[in-house]
Amino acid sequence: MAGFLLRRLLYAIGTLWVVASVTFVLMRVTPGGPFDRERRLPPEVLANIAAKYHLDDPWFQQYLRYLKEIAQGDLGPSYKYLDRSVGDIILTTFPVSASLGSVALLATLVLALCAGLLAASSRDSWIDRSCLFIATLGIALPHFIFGAGVIWLFSLQMGLLPPAGWGSLPALILPTLTLAAAPAAYLASLLRSTLLETLDDDFIRTARAKGLPESLVLLKHALSNSLIPTLSALGPLIAAMLTGSFVVEYIFAIPGMGRFFITAVTDRDYPVIMGVTLVYTTILVCANFVVDLLYSWVDPRVKVS
Amino acid sequence: MLPSTFNYASPSRKGAAWGLFLLLGLFCSCGRSSTPDSENIFRANLGTEPPSLDWSLATDHVSFNVIANLMVGLTEFDDKLKPAPVIATSWEVLEGGKKIIFHLRDDVFWSDGRKVEAKDFEYSWKRLLDPKVASEYAYILFDILNAEEYHQKKITDDRRIGVKATDDRTLEVLLKQPVSYFVAITTFEVTYPQRRDLVEKFGAAWTEPGKLVTNGPYLLSSWKHENEIELTANPKYFLGKPAIEKVKLSMVNEKTTALALYEQGQLDFMDNHSIPALEKPRMSKLPGFQKVPQLRGYYYGFITDRKPFDDVRVRRAFSMAIDRRIFPKILHGGEEPAISWIPPGMLGHNSGIGLPYNPQEAKRLLKEAGYPEGKGLPPVTIGYNTDDDNKIVAEAVQGMWQRNLNVLVRLDNQEWKVYLSKLKNDPPNVFRLGWGADYPDPDNFMKLFTASSGNNNTRWRNARYDRLLDEAAREWNVEKRKRLYDEAQRILCETDVPIMPLFTTAETTVLSPRFTGLQLSSMGRLALQHVRRSSKPDSGR
C-alpha cells in the first residue's frame, strides 16, 4: 500500500509539472498580452509594468521563477485584480465553488441512482422511457438554457426562489439544480445501461432462482456489479463540479472560482490562469485517486496495488 | 414495475416526505425576500468585481464608479463639463499658464478625522508617477515638470517633480509648458489625494474595508469579493451626510439575471450592465427610464498607407456611403449618429463638421479614384472585436457599402486581446475602435490621432493637425480654442479622413420610482450622494 501511495504521489507531482509547463507555454503563445488595452499605453508606462511583474525577463527565466514560486505555494499577483494575489482569489472563491459543487454532486448522485435504478427495474415501460427522455433532455440542454429556464419559471413566473445571489439556502436551489441536471442525466443513463447488461448475467438469474426479492437482487447484486463505469466517470466529474462552472456562476451571480477559467483567459491574467488550472488538476488527481480506492471497495476483484 | 419491497406508504417515509416538502416550502418562502420599503438602502449592480479600489492603479469605470462615491478631489466637472471647485476653493494660473496654484478648503476631513491637506495630493500624484507602482495612468500627469523623466527613471529624486504642497492649504503645480486642459485633469479620480501613512502601513491591503480611509460621501463598509460591496453614509462628509444610509452594489454579470432581480424588487437601479439589448425597447416604457448620452465615440479607422485607403478620395467615398441614422434604430441604446469626432456636450463639438451621407458623391469619388462601381478595388476587410453590437454595426456598414458603392467587404472578428494584437501587427484595412473620455476636454479626444500617439492605428500623420492641437492645448481663450479644434476636426473628418466617426454612445438607465436624485454623468459615473427616497407613491416597476 505504501508503494502504491508513493507511486501515486510521484505521478501527481509529474502531472502537475506537465500541466503547469503546458499552461505556461500556451499562455505565452496566445496572441495578446495582459496589458493590451483599447487605450494603448505609452512605452515607458508599459516598461514599468513589465518590470513590476518580471514580464521583461526572458521566457525561460520567467518559467523557472514560476515553477519556484509554485513549489513555494506562491501563485503570484493577479494582473487584473491589482489589490489581490492569486492565492487570495482562490482562497475566497474556491470554497464557494466547492460548497455549491458538493451539494450539486450529492444531488447528482441521488438523482442518477434513483433514475438509473427506476429505469432499469422498469425496462421498456413508460417509466423507463420517461426517465430516458428526461435524461436525454438533461444532457442535451446547455447550462445557460436550463439556468435561464429555471429562473424564468421559479423566479419570474412563480416568484418562489431568488434568481441570483449567494449566502442563503433558497439562493442555492436553482444553481444546484442547473449544475446537477446534465451530470445526473448522463450518470443515470450510464447506470441504466450497465444495470440492464448486468441484469442479464447468469449470477442474477441464479439469485432470482434462489428466490431473493427483486429489490435485493437489484440493490445488492446488480448495482454493486454495475458501478465501475459510473465510478470511472465520477473522477473528472468531481473535479469539474468542485472547481465551479463558468456558466452557472455567471448566470446565478455565484462568487465562485469557475468564472475565472474563462475570464482569466480573456484577460490574459497569466497567474490566475495558472492558479485555477493547478487547483483543477490537483482536485482531478485526488478525485481519481479516491475513485481508484473505491473500485476495490465496490469490486474486491480490483486490487489497489 | 417497482419492486414490491419499496413501500413508499410506510409511516416513517411518509413523515420524511412531508418534512422534505415543508423544508422546501420554507426555502421557497425565504426566496421572496426583498428589502422592505422602510429600510434606507439603495441597491445597484456594478456588473463585475472592481479590479482595484486603489485610485492610483484603477483603470476601469467599474472601479471608478465605486471610488467616485468614496472620494472627492480638487475639482469635479459641472453640468457644462467644466472643472468646478470641490476641495480646491480656487486656482490661480501664473507665468503664462506654466504654474497653477490650487487653494484648498479648510473643512474637508478624512473618515478617521484628520484634515485633508495639500501634502495628500502631492503624495498621491507622486505615487501615481512612481515607476515601482507602475500605474497605467501615470502618463496623465506627464505635463508636470519632470514627471515623465521621473517615471522613466531618468531622475530619481521625487522632489524635482513639479508638484509641491507649499503649506497645508496650497498646492503648487509647475508644468513643462502651458496646458489649458490641466485643471480638467484634476476631475479625474487618479488625481484624488492619498494618505502616505496608511498606504505605507497596510501595503497593497490599504483599500480593504476597515483600512481604507476616504473623504467622500460614502464609506466602504464591506467588500465581499465577486459578490457585493456595501457603502455607508459618511457622517463627516463636508457637504453633508447623504440621505441614503446604505448602498449595496452587487456584481451580477448576466444581464437577464440582473433584470430579474430588478423585477423582483431586489435592485433599485439598472444601467447598461443590467439591461439586455433586446429588453431596451420594453425598458423604455418603464417609469424612471432615461438615456444618458456619453462622452464615448465609436469609429472606424482606415489603414492609410495601404491600397485602396492610401487614396483620400476612397476614404471620403467610404465615409460618405454610410447613413449613420441607422445605428440608433438597430442598436436601441440611444446612440447619437456622428460625423465629427468631438462628442456633443464637450468643448469644441461642432455638428456642422464632417462628411454627411451622400451616396452619389461617394460613387463619384470612387470613380475618380479609378474604381468605377467598385471595379478593381482591392479586397476590403472590416475588422472588429467579437461582440453582438459590433457585429450589427459591421453588417449594417457592409450592406450600405454594397448598396451604395457596389463593394462587397469581408467581415473579420476576433476575441478582444487577439484583435488588439492584430491591430498592432497585421491590421485589417478598416478597423473598429472606440474612445471614452478620461476627463472632459477635447484634447483627450483629439490627441488620439497625432503622429506621436500610440493610439493612432491609422498610420496617418499630418503636421498641421499636430500643430493645431499643440496650439489649442496652450490656448486659454475658449473661443480661440474652439476655432483651433474646428480646424483640426475638419482635417480629421473632412479633408484627410483617416477615421469615420459613426456614433456616440449612451447609457440606458432605469431608476426605481421609489428613489430620486441619482445622477449618471456623461462620463459614466454613478453619483449616489443625492439619492433619496421618492416622496411619490410607489408606482410599481
Image (tube, rainbow, N blue to C red):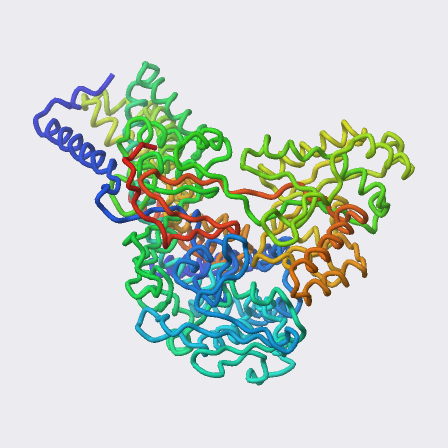
Query: Could you say which is closer to the camera, residue B448 or residue B16?
Result: B448
Query: Could you say which is closer to the camera, residue A69 or residue B225?
Result: B225
Residue at image location 48% in from the left, 42% down from the top: B272
Q: Can residue B498 be spotted in the picture?
A: yes
Left or right relative to B242: residue B449: right
Q: Seen from this angle, which residue lies furthest left?
A: B11
Q: Position of residue A189 (x, y in %)?
A: 38, 28
Query: Could you say which is closer to the camera, residue B473 or residue B9?
Result: B473
Q: Can residue A194 be spotted in the picture?
A: no
Q: Position of residue A153 (x, y in %)?
A: 33, 27
Instruction: Tell me the quadrant of the picture where the N terminus of chain A can be found.
Output: bottom left
| Image quadrant where residue B460 sits | bottom right
Residue at image location 76% in from the left, 32% down from the top: B401
Left or right relative to B342: residue B496: right
Q: Is residue A167 above or below residue A153?
A: below
Residue at image location 46% in from the left, 51% down from the top: A260
| Image quadrant where residue B270 sits | top left
Q: Position of residue B262 (x, y in %)?
A: 36, 38
Q: Is residue A190 above or below residue B442?
A: above
| Image quadrant where residue B459 sits | bottom right
Q: Is residue B429 above or below residue B100?
A: above
Q: Position of residue B31 (x, y in %)?
A: 25, 37
Q: Seen from this angle, which residue lies furthest top?
A: A125
